[in-house]
Image (cartoon, rainbow, N blue to C red):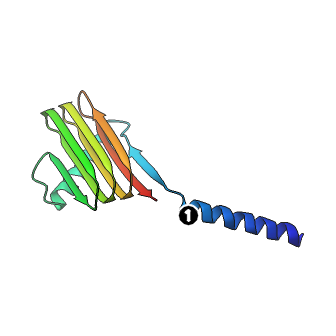
Amino acid sequence: MKRTLLSTAIALATLATGVAHAGGSVSLTVNPRNAQEAQALRVGLGLYALHKQVESDAHVSQQGNGNAAAIGQSGQGHRGIIEQDGDGHEATLDQSGRGHSCGIFQFGEGTRANVRQRGRGESCLVLQAGWD
């Protein structure tokens, strides 16, 4: 019994150590299910932009090294925000049509997001964290 417990403890410790040193990322994407949720997300992004004193419909903020971001917009009434904090992030946001909103927030190291919004009134939120 003691031998089994010791073996199990060693195996778990080895796995935990391997996971702690492995690189990777986690991503959470929020896509509203209806017009009310989309409006709530648009308002939230608008309040965030107001807090950050963003004066344009497209905003990129980068802290760190080796980050890349691009926002393309055609049409009217879009809001696009990309925030990168850390190193080696990549993000693109392509909005065409009318009234889209999206916030992409990347933290840590080495995350990648590509969002394309077409038509009318789409909203999304992308939260990513990466590590080496």
Report the front residue among 87 and 62.
Answer: 87
Picture coordinates of residue 123 (x, y %)? 29, 40
**Quadrant of image for the N terminus:** bottom right
Quarter of the image holding residue 11? bottom right
- What residue is at 18 percent from the left and 31 percent from the top? 98
Quarter of the image holding residue 17? bottom right
Left or right: 110 in relation to 63: right
Can residue 39 be seen in this snapshot? Answer: no
Report the front residue among 4 and 43.
Answer: 4
Quarter of the image holding residue 117? top left
Most extreme residue toward the front is 66
The residue type indicated by label 1 comes to Ala
Residue pointed to by mark 1: 20
- What residue is at 18 percent from the left and 61 percent from the top? 51
Left or right: 32 in relation to 4: left
Picture coordinates of residue 102 (x, y %)? 27, 43
Report the front residue among 72 and 43.
Answer: 72
Can residue 111 be seen in this snapshot? Answer: yes
Picture coordinates of residue 58 (x, y %)? 16, 46
Residue 19 sits above or below residue 127 on the image: below
Most extreme residue toward the left is 55
The 10 Å Cα crowd at callout 1, few under 14, some 14 to 19, many 20 or more, is: few
Picture coordinates of residue 2 (x, y %)? 87, 72
- What residue is at 31 percent from the left and 38 percent from the top? 115
- What residue is at 24 percent from the left and 34 percent from the top? 121
For the residue labelled by badge 1, is the local secondary structure a helix, a strand or a loop?
A: helix
Left or right: 11 in relation to 132: right
Residue 97 sits above or below residue 60 on the image: above
